[in-house]
Amino acid sequence: MGDGTETRLGTVCEHADRIRDRLAGVDGGASLVDAVTEAALEGRGVSEALDDLHSALVALGDGAGLHGYAAGAHRVGALDPVPSGIGLPRPASALYRCPQGRCSRTWEPNPAEDPPTCLVGDRPLRAPRRV
């Protein structure tokens, strides 16, 4: 992967429910999210599936498309056009990450919550390694 694919895939993983809700009124809208996760799971055409999803969001009037959903972990209501997990107050070594290394999604640990589940692999995000 390349061309920002890891960041865009992380955004879909982190905000899939919100993206699905936005696409609810579009025929086949939810299948665009499914196409991204299936392509990632099978290791094929993720960038193309992400482009299709982005274009559908732009066509709905979301000018930033997929980028509009890229907000730091646990920034409730934020729609900043920045990659998911960027700019968090903790060092990178303290962040949970994609269990398969497919995307750049991160999650800041919170004792009151279990780590979120990877949308592609259906496993919790990976804990930081202890040194």
Image (cartoon, rainbow, N blue to C red):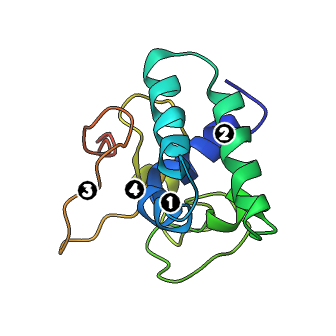
Q: Distance between the residues labelled 3 and 2?
A: 24 Å
Residue identifier under label 4: 94
Q: Residue 40, position in %: x, y?
A: 50, 26
C-beta proximity under 8 Å, tags 1 and 4: yes
Q: Residue 103 carries which label?
A: none
**Secondary structure of the residue carrying numbered label 3:** loop
Residue at 43% x, 73% y is 74
Q: In the image, which is nearer the foreground, mark 3 or mark 2?
A: 2
Counting residues from the start of the chain, the first of labels 4 and 3 encountered is: 4
Q: In the image, which is nearer the foreground, mark 4 or mark 2?
A: 2
C-beta proximity under 8 Å, tags 4 and 3: no
The three-letter code of the residue at mark 1 reads Pro
Residue identifier under label 2: 50
Q: How far apart are marks 2 and 1 (CA)?
A: 29 Å
Q: Residue 69, position in %: x, y?
A: 62, 65
Task: Please tell me which residue lies in front, 113 or 68.
Answer: 68
Residue identifier under label 3: 115
Residue at 29% x, 55% y is 116
Q: How far apart are marks 1 and 4 (CA)?
A: 6 Å
The quadrant in which the N terminus is found is top right
The three-letter code of the residue at mark 2 reads Leu
Q: In the image, which is nearer the foreground, mark 3 or mark 1?
A: 3
Quick one: label 2, few (<14), some, or many (20+) residues within 10 Å? many
Quick one: label 4, few (<14), some, or many (20+) residues within 10 Å? some
Q: How far apart are marks 4 and 3 (CA)?
A: 13 Å
Q: Residue 63, position in %: x, y?
A: 82, 68
Residue identifier under label 1: 91
Q: In the image, which is nearer the foreground, mark 4 or mark 3?
A: 3
